[in-house]
Image (cartoon, rainbow, N blue to C red):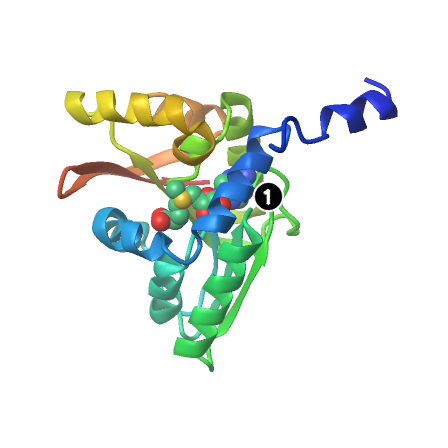
Amino acid sequence: MNRLEESIAAWPVAGLPATLADRTRRVYDRMAAVYPVSTLLFHSRAHRCALEASGMSDGMRVLEVATGSGEMFRRLVRANRGGATIGVDLSPNMAARTQRTARRKYPSARTHCQAVDARHMPFRSESFDAIFCCYLLELLSTEDISTTLGEFRRILKDRGRLALVLIGQNTALFNAVYRVAGKVAPAFWGRQVEHRVPALVKTVPFQIVDDRTVRQTFYPSRVLVMRK
Ligand SMILES: C[S@@+](CC[C@H](N)C(=O)[O-])C[C@H]1O[C@@H](n2cnc3c(N)ncnc32)[C@H](O)[C@@H]1O
């Protein structure tokens, strides 16, 4: 594709950004103020489980990818007051909210949050002891999941840990509802990838060291912890 074709392909179509990632950024930007409710109702139990299973300890350099409105990020900052906790999210509004609320609650902690696309991380190789990433992979294409997992491996220190939280696929009714939601608003819901991800992480390669399922009300999650 030449430069002109590339710029035409990136133009908004009928008022919508041309790529799914652009739409995802836009929709999550708009949701930043109300998103904490959804985290509280559906994600907080899995967040707690991921932190427990990760083996993270105070004093580490920790990265959270796709912070959303910052509930897990604050949990990480609280557990890592002697270390540095960095957060990224594609949506500038989500990243700004996460930064603001973490700094207000933990003013003396070393924290930083910025708008970054997880597929291209602006960090040096082997910079982090632990990475957390909850409910992001559903929003990426299979190719982008592999690229992003490759970035996680690159920026993790040797024997560093990656904790992934995925939407569970072990409930037929939930899966049916999710399929419809994903068709109606793919940029917000994406699609379930829980069954595909364990095979993908092994090709990066990562070694899975912990694997748990969690349910909060009707919402299933799977927590995978792996080592570089
Ligand atoms: C379903 S929300 C999950 C938020 C949070 N991790 C949680 O557990 O509640 C997905 C988040 O991923 C972010 N996101 C989507 N695509 C991304 C990308 N390519 N890079 C970084 N963040 C992304 C969205 O902006 C949104 O905040």
Q: Amino acid at mark 1?
A: Asp
Q: Quadrant of the N terminus?
A: top right
Query: Looking at this rendering, what residue extends furthest in the bottom direction?
Result: 108
- Which of 162/180 is in front? 180
- Which of 190/85 is in front? 190
Query: Looking at this rendering, what residue extends furthest in the top direction?
Result: 1
Instruction: Report which quarter residue 135 is drawn in.
Output: top left
- Which of 138/159 is in front? 138
- Which of 54/34 is in front? 34
Q: Is mark 1 within 8 Å of ligand 1?
A: yes
- Answer above or below: position of 71 versus 182: below
Residue displayed at 53% across by 62% down: 96
Residue displayed at 60% across by 49% down: 116
Q: Pointer 1: what residue?
A: 117
Residue displayed at 51% across by 50% down: 29
- Answer above or below: position of 102 versus 174: below
Residue displayed at 38% across by 33% down: 189
Identify the secondary structure beneath mark 1. loop
Instruction: Report which quarter residue 78 is drawn in.
Output: bottom left
Query: Looking at this rendering, what residue extends furthest in the front direction?
Result: 14
Image position, residue 19 (x, y; %):
61, 29
Q: Is residue 134 visible?
A: no
Q: Is residue 79 visible?
A: yes
Task: From the viewer's perspective, tell me whether residue 186 is left or right of residue 150.
Answer: left
Task: From the viewer's perspective, tell me whether residue 178 is left or right of residue 32.
Answer: left
Instruction: Report which quarter residue 218 is drawn in.
Output: top left
Image position, residue 184 (x, y; %):
38, 25
Task: From the viewer's perspective, tell me whether residue 92 is left or right of residue 55.
Answer: right
- Answer above or below: position of 89 versus 79: above
Task: From the viewer's perspective, tell me whether residue 170 is left or right of residue 161.
Answer: left
